[in-house]
């Protein structure tokens, strides 16, 4: 590890520590493209991830070579992007492994690398940054750094709110980490809220995607074999029973919660409606649909919400009028 001499640094260029982003004073002699504020941070990064990726960083952090043709330049750029993708996933996997092993301190540098590679590839506001923010939040919670964890989770929440393309897994991890944060802060009401969201949003997304496919086929009345289309959840009996148990428990929690958030209650009710509709249990689907419709009207919620539930009721009624034979 060599000390950086200020006069050797080009004017206007700021060298930052790989771990904390403080002004750097040392450089890795093996790759010469990674900087640190202290020996402590260099050792932490080396132990966590740098030893594994040291030489891989050189082509990413140096200027692209001169190419003789546009075709060669495009090929070089493609290779660079492939390296970035590989490092994003590799650093993420390494950080995840440390967390599974309870090595929260070691997880931080690896997760930071994954975050910075994601920023370089996808920009500062991409939803692709969220998994790395969540890893850093989980590591910070494990280290008892509540304020730091809250900052990472705020970044993740803000990014998700601005995005229209966020996976079920990401939503789940976000709410799970928020639940753990509020447990650490001893705010158990908020913890229950986010842990309930974790589960209900996953089930809602799964069932809604399945419902969209079914409703399109239902409108056509017949399948490719010329037979009536039969609803199906895509789950086995045990999974259907588990879904019912989980969602009814969340509904009970929503209905007894002190904040009485009607929008969240309607959300769970709609999830139960779709579940029972796909299970071909029209009476239960209709029961929850009427309950949701009453709540929407009583609380004067969004008109579109009322229309959505009316549409579900129409589908349920159509199923009752034309039972499967």
Image: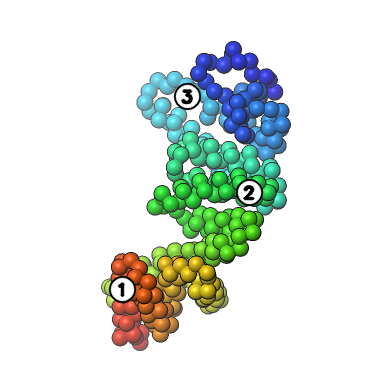
Note whether 234 is above or below 165 in the view shown: below
Kindly report the distance in space between the C-alpha atoms of the residues bearing marks 3 and 1: 56 Å
Kindly report the distance in space between the C-alpha atoms of the residues bearing marks 1 and 2: 44 Å
Mark 3 crowd level (few <14, some 14–19, many ≥20, 10 Å Cα) = few
Image location (x, y in percent) of residue 247: 51, 73
Note whether 188 is above or below 317 in the view shown: above
Note whether 41 is above or below 228 in the view shown: above
Image location (x, y in percent) of residue 12: 50, 18
Query: Circles 1 and 2: CB distance less than 8 Å?
Result: no
Check residue 146 in the rendering and tell me which mark sits there, or answer none. Answer: 2
Q: Which residue is mark 1?
A: 311
Q: Is residue 243 visible?
A: no
Q: Which residue is mark 3?
A: 64
Mark 2 crowd level (few <14, some 14–19, many ≥20, 10 Å Cα) = some
Query: Circles 2 and 3: CB distance less than 8 Å?
Result: no
Note whether 221 is above or below 62 in the view shown: below
- Residue 189: quarter of image: bottom right
Which residue is found at the position 49% from the left and 38% from the top? 119
Image location (x, y in percent) of residue 115: 54, 40
Mark 1 crowd level (few <14, some 14–19, many ≥20, 10 Å Cα) = few
Check residue 168 in the rendering and tell me which mark sits there, or answer none. Answer: none
Which scheme is used to colour this image of the protein?
Answer: rainbow
Kindly report the distance in space between the C-alpha atoms of the residues bearing marks 2 and 3: 41 Å
Q: Nearer the viewer, residue 11 or 260?
A: 260
Q: Which numbered disc, 3 or 1, marks the residue closer to the eye?
A: 1
Q: Is residue 23 visible?
A: yes
Q: Nearer the viewer, residue 73 or 84?
A: 84
Q: Quadrant location of the N terminus?
A: top right
- Left or right of residue 203, residue 295 in this image: left
Tell which circle, 3 or 1, labels the residue nearer the N-terminal end. Answer: 3
- Left or right of residue 172, residue 266 in this image: left
Which residue is found at the position 67% from the left and 19% from the top? 3
């Amino acid at each position: 590890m060599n000390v950086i001499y200020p006069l050797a640094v080009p004017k206007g260029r700021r060298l930052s520590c790989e771990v904390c982003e403080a002004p750097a004073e040392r450089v890795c002699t093996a790759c010469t493209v990674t900087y640190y504020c202290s020996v402590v941070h260099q050792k932490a990064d080396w132990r966590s991830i740098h030893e594994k990726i040291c030489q891989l960083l050189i082509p990413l952090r140096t200027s692209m070579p001169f190419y003789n043709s546009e075709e060669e330049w495009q090929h070089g750029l493609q290779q660079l992007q492939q390296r970035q993708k590989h490092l994003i996933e590799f650093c993420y996997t390494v950080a995840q492994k440390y967390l599974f092993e309870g090595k929260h301190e070691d997880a931080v540098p690896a997760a930071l690398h994954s975050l910075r590679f994601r920023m370089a590839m996808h920009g500062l506001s991409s939803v692709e940054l969220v998994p790395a923010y969540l890893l850093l939040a989980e590591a910070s919670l494990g280290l008892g750094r509540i304020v730091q964890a809250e900052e990472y989770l705020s970044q993740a929440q803000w990014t998700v709110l601005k995005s229209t393309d966020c996976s079920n897994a990401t939503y789940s991890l976000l709410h799970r980490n928020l639940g753990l944060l509020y447990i650490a802060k001893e705010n158990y009401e908020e913890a229950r809220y986010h842990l309930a969201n974790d589960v209900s949003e996953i089930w809602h997304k799964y069932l809604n995607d399945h419902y969209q496919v079914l409703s399109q086929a239902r409108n056509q009345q017949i399948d490719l074999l010329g037979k009536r289309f039969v609803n199906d959840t895509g789950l086995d009996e045990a999974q259907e029973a588990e879904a019912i148990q989980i969602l009814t428990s969340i509904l009970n929690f929503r209905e007894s919660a002190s904040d009485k958030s009607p929008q969240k209650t309607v959300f769970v009710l709609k999830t139960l409606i779709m579940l029972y509709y796909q299970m071909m249990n029209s009476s239960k689907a209709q029961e929850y649909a009427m309950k949701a419709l009453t709540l929407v009207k009583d609380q004067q919620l969004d008109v579109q919400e009322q229309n959505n539930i009316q549409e579900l009721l129409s589908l349920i009624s159509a199923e009752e009028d034309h039972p499967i034979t």
